[in-house]
Amino acid sequence: MPEREITYREAINEAFVQEMQRDPNVILLGEDIAGAPGRDDPDMLDAWGGVFGMTKGLVGKFGSQRMLDTPISESAFIGAAVGAAASGMRPVVELMFVGFCGVCLDQIVNQGAKLRYMFGGRAKVPVTVRTTIGAGLGAAAQHSDCLYSIFTHYPGLKCVLPATPADAKGLLAAAIRDDDPVIYFENKVLYETKGPVPEGEHVVEIGKANIVRQGTDVTVVALSRMVNVALEAADILNKEGISIEIVDPRTISPLDEQTILDSVRKTERLVVVDEDHPRCSMATDIIALVATKAFEYLDAPARMVTPPHTPVPFSPVLEKFYVPDAQRIVKAVMAVVPQKR
Amino acid sequence: MPIKKDRLKWIYERMCLIRKFEDHVHDEFAAGAIAGFVHLYAGEEAIAVGTMANLRDDDSITSTHRGHGHCIAKGVDINAMLAEIYGKATGACKGKGGSMHIADMTKGMLGANGIVGAGPPLACGAALAAKLRGTDQVTACFFGDGASNQGTFHESLNLASIWDLPIVFVAENNVYAETTSTDYSMRVPNIADRAVAYGIPGVVVDGMDVFAVYDAAAEAVARARKGKGPTLLEGKTYRYYGHFEGDTILYRTKQEEQSYKDRDPILQFHKRVLEEGLLSEDQLAKIDQQTDTTLKKAKIFAAASPFPEPQECLEDVYVKYP
Ligand SMILES: Cc1ncc(C[n+]2csc(CCOP(=O)(O)OP(=O)(O)O)c2C)c(N)n1
Ligand SMILES: [Mg+2]
């Protein structure tokens, strides 16, 4: 497939076009995903295309029957997406910011996640819930969480978190095609980032990690936007003669344990970089995985680089302190490698 | 009942202050001096001020993401508000909350709120506390047309009605929730019509007319104070700026915007008090000047204030956490 550079946002949009053309059962629901719903004025059509413009242009291509703007009623419309999925549709529903999940969690975790199991496997719920995560925009405590770890806690949900434009496209396509409920986490700081993305059909298998950079000294498992921060750290460390291997799990439920374990067996050192809250998190989960399945390979205690155990603060000064940066990764890596000098 | 002269002056002063504050924040955001999500209240002043003119200092309010006007009307210090919006250590929330979370518990201001529909349950709690303690404090719960489609709104109206909680639910119907107009998002013409389902009074007023809001709020507050339960009061209004700063506003027409600006709450008030001889030109001009000075002081205060120390990120999560 030929590739060209497009943004993370464009990649998401492209996946939608691809999947909506492919399958008429794919419908989108969410607040202002098109904009100005119900207005006849053609100039108003598509007034927003989503709060960050991810779904712009789709209503023009597919019509308002498949691009359903909703009232601010998350329990109702996310639950409706679950119900429609159980009834043969393939809905993609947007929860504008993951921090709003408290409003509608039952429909996701008690309905979407459990119907199949409770019904003895006699139901399937091919719904995709898209949501936005991440600090860095000064959006304060209720609009900056990551919270993906809590969804991995629920059996029955799959969770994917693309870090690159190519994965944004490929994982969204995979999420939509998947017959189980998938939560798709878009990092809002990544929308403008560019990268090579295959033209035409592109699907990234759910459950496959990506080795973003090969290395020999330390395995750095980094999630979502932290992959880019780890890449920055890798360049700094390179100058010190330290080579890190960056593993991006890409999907956290299921988790590609094998790729992580293989890498740790090779480097014998582990640092996990996770922007989510640090308790009961992907960071602790990955360290537990390595501690139980590859402990004998570890030459140093595993380290985690995470925000502190606080909500996300507003002030730019505080937010900068909160979000892990390259220097913190460098420090953690330096702490686990034997000093060369 | 005619409004006392001092109250009228206060009403004008607060409305002017809100408008000037919001215009300033708009300019500062455009200049890149303010981060994050900022939602401005300009155009809706009559609702916050007309309601708050009936509240006491020890009454409580809950607010929304569009909270600056509620804060100013409830008497939150504007120095601390502006400093908060810049993320300064002297801010109302020490820089932790920003525009969307300004609060002042000492003024009964239970916080601007980033979650649409989060206010009504909190208001039930504030009102329950007053009721259980046998005080006659009232809670005013501000929320938007969009929020009235949230389950929490309906659950709270039901709860407040069966417990006769001392609440005034104040719907600020500014026609839009982001880009979504009320003709699309609800089948009833008025939010207040929904009161029927909960057996409480539902009242619609012109939210651009502070006198109308004042009168309706006076009645609803009196009812709540007497222990007779909640009222759902709806003000029809308009936000002059976009949903948030940075909004391209492609979902409404210039004519529509103008039709509301023609009925601007501050200009209307100005005209009426002069026509009816309630306040003089001089009195109004003096208030106008005062508000300029107040805002100027706030700007100086905010600019001179330091940012928090980064380590302060770690504080205020718990009262105690060993
Ligand atoms: C639970 C929740 N859903 C969605 C949002 C995103 N959002 C923020 S403000 C807003 C519109 C609110 O409309 P309305 O209640 O009418 O208040 P207005 O902005 O008009 O003052 C939306 C959808 C949110 N903050 N919280
Ligand atoms: Mg509104």
Image (cartoon, coloured by chain):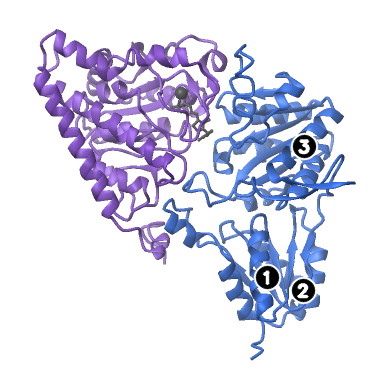
Chain colours: A blue, B purple
Chain letter of the residue beneath label 1 in the structure image: A
Q: Is residue A246 visible?
A: yes
Q: Are marks 3 and 1 in contact (CB under 8 Å)?
A: no
Marks 1 and 2 sit apart, C-alpha to C-alpha, by: 9 Å
Q: Secondary structure at mark 1?
A: helix
Q: Report the amino acid beneath label 1.
A: Ala
Chain letter of the residue beneath label 3 in the structure image: A
Q: Are marks 1 and 2 in contact (CB under 8 Å)?
A: yes
Q: Which residue is mark 3?
A: A14
**Position of residue B303 measured from the top left corner of the image (x, y, whole percent):** 29, 51
Q: Are marks 2 and 3 in contact (CB under 8 Å)?
A: no
Asked whether B122 or A260 is in front, the reply is: A260
Q: Report the amino acid beneath label 2.
A: Gly
Q: Which residue is mark 1?
A: A234
Circle nearer the N terminus (2, 3): 3
Asked whether A73 or B250 is in front, the reply is: B250
A10 shown above or below A264: above
Instruction: Pick out the residue farthest to the bottom.
Output: A341
**Position of residue B21 measured from the top left corner of the image (x, y, whole percent):** 30, 35
Q: Is residue B239 left or right of residue A181?
A: left
On residue A215, the disc is 2
Q: Quadrant of residue B318?
A: bottom left
